[in-house]
Image (cartoon, helix red, strand yellow):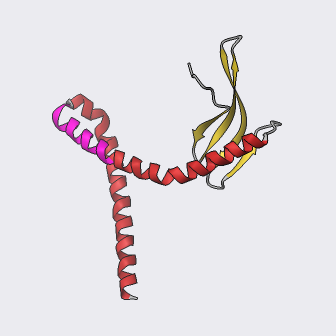
């Protein structure tokens, strides 16, 4: 099991987290998680759940988590994009060297659609960037 139990646990969700207070019930061999707050990363705010009271230490820990998460998200997203490139390359190798017809039946349409969607977004963003650069050079 976990050697050092944190006081708070942050369960990630879209644009935030649900915050739980951790309690070790050694007598019953259980780990209790009580929801105490929700975090909205977009606004940087958090709200208590129900009638739960947050201590100053809880509030400081939540604020620190928000600051750390907001700071790390941009590089996490870039890292995810780099991982997608690697995954696409590995998938191409798998398709070429190992995939059976039956394997490809199940994934080909989904891969085509995902790649088409990504290509459309990249083309549109590139065109916008080139237009902006051309306009800036003209001005």
Does 87 appear in magenta? yes
Q: Can residue 132 be seen in this view?
A: yes
**Looking at the picture, how far across and down is residue 22, in whole percent?**
68, 28
Q: Is residue 15 left or right of residue 90?
A: right
Q: In this view, does 34 lie above or below 70?
A: above
As drawn, the residue found furthest toward the left would be: 97
Residue drawn at point x = 58 percent, y = 41 percent: 13
Work out whether 94 lies above or below 59.
Answer: above
Place of residue 37 in the rendered image (x, y in percent of width and height, measured from the top left): 72, 40
- Total marks shown come to 0
Compared across the picture, whether 35 is left or right of 93 comes to: right
Residue 134 or 119: which is nearer the viewer?
A: 134
- Indicate the quadrant containing the N terminus: top left, top right, bottom left or bottom right: top right
* Quadrant position of residue 43: bottom right
What span is in magenta? 85-98
Magenta region, mostly helix, strand or loop? helix
**What residue is drawn where x is 78% and y is 43%?**
56
- Is 42 colored magenta in this rendering? no
Q: Is residue 113 visible?
A: no
- Residue plotted at (57% across, 22% down): 2
- Image quadrant in which you'd find residue 103: top left
Q: Quadrant where the C terminus lies?
A: bottom left
**Residue occupying image coordinates x 31% and y 33%:** 106
Camera-side residue of 39 and 96: 39
Q: Closest to the observer: 122 or 133?
A: 133
Residue at the extreme bottom: 139
Give the x, y percent position of residue 138.
36, 87
């Amino acid at each position: 099991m976990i050697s050092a139990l944190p006081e708070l646990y942050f369960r990630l969700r879209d644009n935030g987290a649900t915050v739980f207070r951790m309690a070790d019930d050694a007598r019953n061999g259980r780990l209790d998680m009580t929801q105490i707050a929700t975090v909205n990363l977009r606004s940087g705010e958090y709200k208590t759940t129900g009638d739960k009271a947050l201590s100053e230490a809880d509030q400081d820990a939540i604020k620190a988590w928000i600051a750390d998460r907001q700071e790390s998200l941009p590089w996490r997203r870039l890292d995810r994009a780099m991982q997608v490139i690697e995954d696409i390359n590995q998938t191409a190798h798998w398709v070429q060297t190992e995939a059976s017809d039956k394997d490809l039946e199940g994934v080909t349409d989904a891969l085509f659609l995902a790649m088409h969607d990504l290509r459309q977004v990249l083309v549109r963003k590139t065109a916008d960037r080139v237009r902006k650069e051309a306009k800036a050079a003209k001005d």
